[in-house]
Image (cartoon, coloured by chain):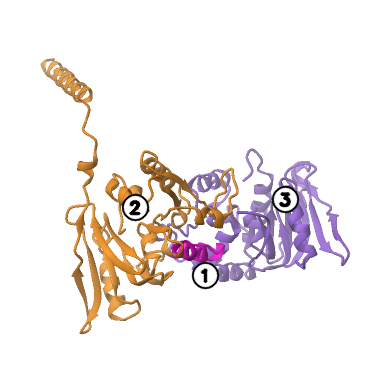
Chain colours: A purple, B orange
């Protein structure tokens, strides 16, 4: 849902199409981290238009007007897209509504899970949030047994905060720059793709003496011809997360 | 407050003034927590349009969308004279506050003597229990418990809440408590109810308890606040002249069209 750049949207839609064996995959947007902001929901429907997919969204603030059976709805999607905002508010509201359990179930059934910013952090065991005040650790859903930091290039304080937290015992993980997406199959990182040339993701860990940052090989989605796009995987339990 | 107030047009300006007076300082700092509505833009906008012209210093804190500035939640909350919690989903409000540790900060604020108030979900949150409609049907939910008893809101405007509240009290799934109409506020000093005020004619509040297996509603004595009409400034004469001139012009136009 980057402005004027549909490369990552196209990428996740392609995964969803293959997962669902449908030309118009079923996509549900979860705008919880933004407080179900109206403008964000509108932007989703513009990016994930009905000619591309069968879009829906789930509001936890106006749930009385939402889709009937939330669990049933989420488990029958091909792709669940989580929007950005505050990851702390996101996890708090999800747990109150039991969405944490439903999303794990969806993942185990092979629904493709993706999201950006807070919508990336949430899938990991540990994450770095810098919403109000300095960067601090937060416990995510733990589908991916790693740590995660987003906006790695855009916010120097976050980058420094991640390094500090790794030194203090945070588990190894992945940092993503804006426009870079980590694509996991199960718990394993399958590839890194990006919507902008030159942006990347990094493997981060504490060696016992220092924090090591290893830039990961990546594919810029814009450079490839339609026929040459990286192979999308039909494997179960896919998650694509972007900063 | 059981409902109404600044966030539901046309508003209850008397309640806004009442809240500011409760702070007992000439120019109170008042902070909106719009968490229950997901930091909805229109709630925030209405808050500023209601309080901007009153003798106070309004601000708000977002727990979803970062504005231009990062704030220290503790510092902002504890430096206010009034914390005003907006309406929305009670379930989400409590869950998001707990996730941010705001529940502990609010207790601290209360113990420091900061005035805590709110509308709808922002009213129920202070009691031991309230009713959430997050799942469609109203359902009891455990709240912060600063104030003893339970609370149900929109008692007059959302009739489906009444039977559910009665049922919850009969079944003792919530303690006895207060059912409150739109436009009505209950003022507590510490945990004691000291006054009930109404900004709307006929609106009230009720103490609801279980008596012989039935939920019994006892009306609470109300102090009437000036209504909306009484607080409206008188219309300037120039505006009255203009309106009359326009009415006249329109009726002439109608008459001409009628002739054709």
Residue B149: within the magenta? no
The kind of secondary structure element at disc 1 is loop
The span shown in magenta is B91-110
Question: Is residue A28 at least partly visible in the picture?
Answer: no
Between tags 1 and 2, which lies in front?
2
Residue A161, given in percent of the width and then of the height, sits at 73, 56
The kind of secondary structure element at disc 3 is helix
Residue B245, given in percent of the width and then of the height, sits at 18, 19
Q: Chain of mark 1?
A: A
- In the rendered image, the vertical position of residue A1 relative to residue A166, given as above or below: above
- The quarter in which the C terminus of chain B is drawn is top left
Q: Which mark is residue A157?
A: 3
- In the rendered image, the vertical position of residue B91 relative to residue A11, given as above or below: below
**Residue A221 versus residue B102: which sits nearer the camera?**
B102
Residue beneath disc 1: A98
Q: In percent of the image, x 60 and y 54: which residue is there?
A: A132
Residue beneath disc 2: B19
């Amino acid at each position: 849902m980057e402005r004027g750049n549909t490369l990552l949207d196209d990428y996740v839609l392609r995964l969803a199409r293959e997962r669902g064996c449908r030309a118009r995959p079923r996509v549900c947007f979860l705008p919880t981290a933004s407080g179900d902001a109206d403008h964000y929901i509108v932007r989703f429907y513009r990016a994930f238009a009905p000619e591309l997919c069968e879009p829906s969204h789930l509001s936890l603030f106006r749930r009385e007007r939402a889709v009937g059976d939330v669990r049933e709805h989420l488990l029958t999607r091909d792709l669940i897209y989580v929007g950005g905002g505050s990851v702390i508010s996101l996890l708090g509201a999800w747990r109150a509504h039991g969405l944490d359990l439903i999303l794990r179930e969806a993942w185990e059934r092979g629904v493709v899970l993706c999201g950006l910013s807070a919508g990336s952090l949430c899938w990991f065991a540990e994450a770095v949030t810098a919403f109000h005040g300095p960067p601090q650790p937060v416990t995510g859903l733990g589908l991916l047994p790693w740590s995660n930091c987003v906006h790695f290039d855009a916010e120097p304080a976050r980058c420094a905060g991640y390094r500090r937290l790794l030194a203090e015992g945070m588990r190894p993980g992945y940092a993503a720059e804006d426009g870079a997406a980590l694509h996991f199959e199960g718990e394993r990182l399958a590839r890194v793709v990006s919507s902008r040339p030159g942006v990347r993701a990094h493997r981060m860990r504490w060696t016992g003496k220092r924090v090591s940052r290893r830039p990961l090989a990546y594919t810029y989605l814009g450079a490839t011809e339609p026929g040459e796009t990286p192979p999308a995987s039909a494997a179960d339990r896919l998650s694509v997360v972007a900063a | 407050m059981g409902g109404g107030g600044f966030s539901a047009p046309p508003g209850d300006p008397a309640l806004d003034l009442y809240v500011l007076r409760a702070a007992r300082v000439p120019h109170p700092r008042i902070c909106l927590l719009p968490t229950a509505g997901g930091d909805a833009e229109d709630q925030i906008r209405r808050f500023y349009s209601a309080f901007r012209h009153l003798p106070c210093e309004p601000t708000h804190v977002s727990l979803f969308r970062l504005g231009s500035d990062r704030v220290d939640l503790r510092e902002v909350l504890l430096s206010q004279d009034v914390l005003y919690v907006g309406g929305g989903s009670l379930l989400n409000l409590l869950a998001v506050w707990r996730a941010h540790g705001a529940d502990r900060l609010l207790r601290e604020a209360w113990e420091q003597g900061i005035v805590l108030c709110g509308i709808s979900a922002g009213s129920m949150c202070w009691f031991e229990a309230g009713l959430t409609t997050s799942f469609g049907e109203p359902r009891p939910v455990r709240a912060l418990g600063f104030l003893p008893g339970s609370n149900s809101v929109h008692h007059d405007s959302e009739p489906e809440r009444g039977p559910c509240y009665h049922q919850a009290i009969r079944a003792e799934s919530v303690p006895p408590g207060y059912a409150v109409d739109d436009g009505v506020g209950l003022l507590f000093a510490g945990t004691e109810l000291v006054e009930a005020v109404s900004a709307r004619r006929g609106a009230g509040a009720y103490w609801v308890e279980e008596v012989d297996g039935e939920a019994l509603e006892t009306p609470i004595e109300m102090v009437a606040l000036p209504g909306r009409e009484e607080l409206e400034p008188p219309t300037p004469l120039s505006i009255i002249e203009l309106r009359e001139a326009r009415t006249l012009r329109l009726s002439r136009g109608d008459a001409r069209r009628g002739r054709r």
